[in-house]
Amino acid sequence: MEYPVCSKVASLTPSVTLAISAKAKELKSQGLDVIGFGAGEPDFDTPKHIKDAAVTALNNGFTKYTPSSGTPELKQAIIRKFQRDQGLDYDPKQIIVSCGGKHSCFNVIFSVCNPGDEVIIPSPYWLSYPEMAVLADAKPVIIPASDGNGFKVTPDQLKAAITDKTRIFILNSPGNPTGAVYTPEEIRALADICLEKNVLIMSDDIYEKLLYDGVSHTCPAAFSPEHKAITIIVHGLAKAYSMTGWRIGFAAAPLPIARAMDALQSHSTSNPTSFAQSGAVAALDGPQDHLDGWMAEFDKRRLRALELLNNMKGISCFRSQGAFYLFPKISDTGMKSQEFCEKLLEKARVAAVPGAAFGSDDHIRISYATSLANIEKGLERMADFVSSLT
Ligand SMILES: *Cc1c(COP(=O)(O)O)cnc(C)c1O
């Protein structure tokens, strides 16, 4: 039979990272040592007190449905987090706990957009944003940021992109894949335009705690009650607590949007895993000092990788100040990102993600969520590879 496939789903761009990771796996299975810079998750273990809390919950029989939008305990822990870190007060009804930060983004876009509505997405972008907009029958409107401008879009770019169909501006600072961090002034300028034009801001704050060089994180909701009223914060436990597999994310939204997200979730996934929510309470309420060690280690790797990359012929790398990614420019080698990554894997046995996946074909993404020894070995091989090109 001819199987029916939804045309919207069929039109999704197959992940360009898949070809690379399939090839990396194949080479590994042949016994070749491949160095992987593709990781989108910290290489540290989840802190023990968080695991213990989940195990205790499991052993105590906390294994049934919870309220669809999350347990009251976790919502309170999330409310305390926003009070502590942003000075923001939320009502439990405004907090929606979902199955990961990605799921929170999905719920936001699907709860806000009608067919034909526009979602403004700065590029390079996290690859799921445009696909989510397309699935929601909305139109992704991409505004490009270059490394010359620190991978940040300007107020003029945002202003020029807004139409009467614009519903959401997506802000992701620190950002994936560039690690760029907007200053408070830059975010204020963008947020003021959204306020003036009645555009919602979806602020993806998942990398809030992963900062270097003494820079700080800014959440647009914290500027004023008016800014808070147009901001939906999307967040999660995955990155700062190394809990990617737990699937717990959350959003804080104006009440009507939170209600819509709650309804959507109640008919799709229902609640995120009960005992994972118990672990999330321990993560948010417990000691945060694991981050000191992690960030010191990440920073060492970041600086070393930056040094090695910027010493390579034809490669230049922007000094990212957040997350755990670097986004070096490779186009001066004469190649585009997909070809560069394919050859890098084939000839140097180093796996990196083509920037084309994130909207920039002139760059590649290097994750430093791997050991310093791997970084040195992998980037030495990459240096040999690029100098062999001329
Ligand atoms: C990792 C990530 C998320 C959330 O990931 P989950 O595993 O779904 O919690 C959200 N946004 C960005 C930009 C990310 O890199």
Image: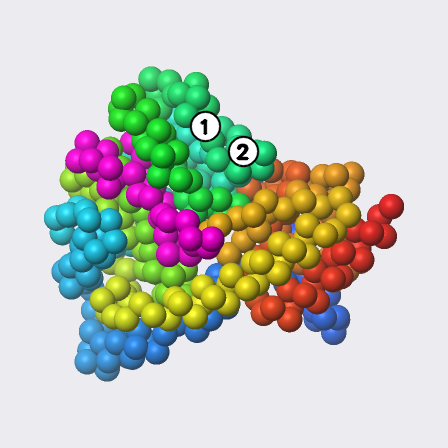
Tell how many labels. 2
Residue highlighted by disc 1:
154
Write down the quadrant of residue 201 in the picture. top left
Magenta range: 200-229
- Left or right of 165: which side holds 278? left
Q: Position of residue 272 (x, y in %)?
A: 28, 60
Instruction: Identify the amino acid type marked 1.
Output: Thr
Q: Is residue 348 above or below residue 13?
A: below
The image quadrant of residue 261 is top left
Q: Is residue 206 magenta?
A: yes
Q: Nearer the viewer, residue 195 or 99?
A: 195
Residue at image position (71%, 46%) is 315
Residue at coordinates 35% horizontally, 21% vertically from top-left? Answer: 165
Disc 2 marks a residue whose amino acid type is Asn
Viewer can see residue 262: no
Between residue 87 and residue 92, name the one nearer to us: 87
Q: Which residue is mark 2?
A: 149
Q: Secondary structure at mark 1?
A: loop
| CA distance separating discs 2 and 1 | 9 Å
Q: Secondary structure at mark 2?
A: helix
Q: Are marks 2 and 1 in contact (CB under 8 Å)?
A: yes
217 in the magenta segment:
yes
- Measuring from the top left, give residue 57's x and y in whole percent: 22, 76
Q: Residue at x 72, y 70 (%)?
A: 33
